[in-house]
Image (cartoon, helix red, strand yellow):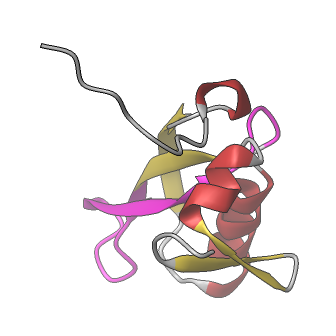
Amino acid sequence: MNVGPTKTIGGDMHSETELMLKGYGLTTAEMFYHMPDYPHVLNTFVWQDYDLAPDHDKLLKFISFWREELDGPLHSVRFVHRKMISPGEWRNVVGEFTYH
C-alpha cells in the first residue's frame, strides 16, 4: 500500500510514509550564495528532501553537486531536520469504538 507521493532512495521507490517509518525525516536547508555576475550580492535557495540524521547524506551530496556544477559559490548553509513520525508512534487501527 502506497500512501502519499513516492521518492527514490537507493534506486527503489518508497512512499513518504514508508520513508518516515524507516527513520527518515524532512530536512530543509537554506543556502546563501554569491550571485555569479554580482559577487557582492547574496541570494538564497531553499532545498527540501527526506534525509537521515545525523549523517545527512542527501544534503551533503546536494552541497557537493552545488560546489562542483553551479557557478554561484556558497556563502553559508543552515538547515533543520525534523522527524515527522518514528516507528514506535505508528499503529495499524482496524476498528474504533465510540462511547458517549
- The x, y position of residue 9, in whole percent, is 78, 73
Q: Is residue 14 magenta?
A: no
- The x, y position of residue 82, in whole percent, is 51, 33
* Residue 24 seen in the current view: no
Position of 85 relative to 13 (above/below): above
The answer to which image quadrant residue 98 occupies is top left
Measuring 45% from the left and 49% from the top, which residue is drawn there? 28
Q: Which residues are magenta?
A: 32-55
Position of 32 relative to 92 (above/below): below
Q: Quadrant of the N terminus?
A: bottom right
Number of numbered tags placed on the structure image: 0
54 and 62: which is toward the camera: 54
Measuring 62% from the left and 73% from the top, which residue is drawn there? 66
37 and 2: which is toward the camera: 2
The answer to which image quadrant residue 89 occupies is top right
* Residue 67 seen in the current view: yes
Q: Quadrant of the C terminus?
A: top left
- The x, y position of residue 24, in whole percent, is 68, 47
Image check: 60 left or right of 94? right
The single residue placed furthest to the right in the displayed view is 10
- The x, y position of residue 78, in whole percent, is 48, 38
Measuring 32% from the left and 83% from the top, which residue is drawn there? 37
Q: Is residue 39 magenta?
A: yes
Measuring 36% from the left and 67% from the top, which residue is drawn there? 39
Position of 55 relative to 12 (above/below): above
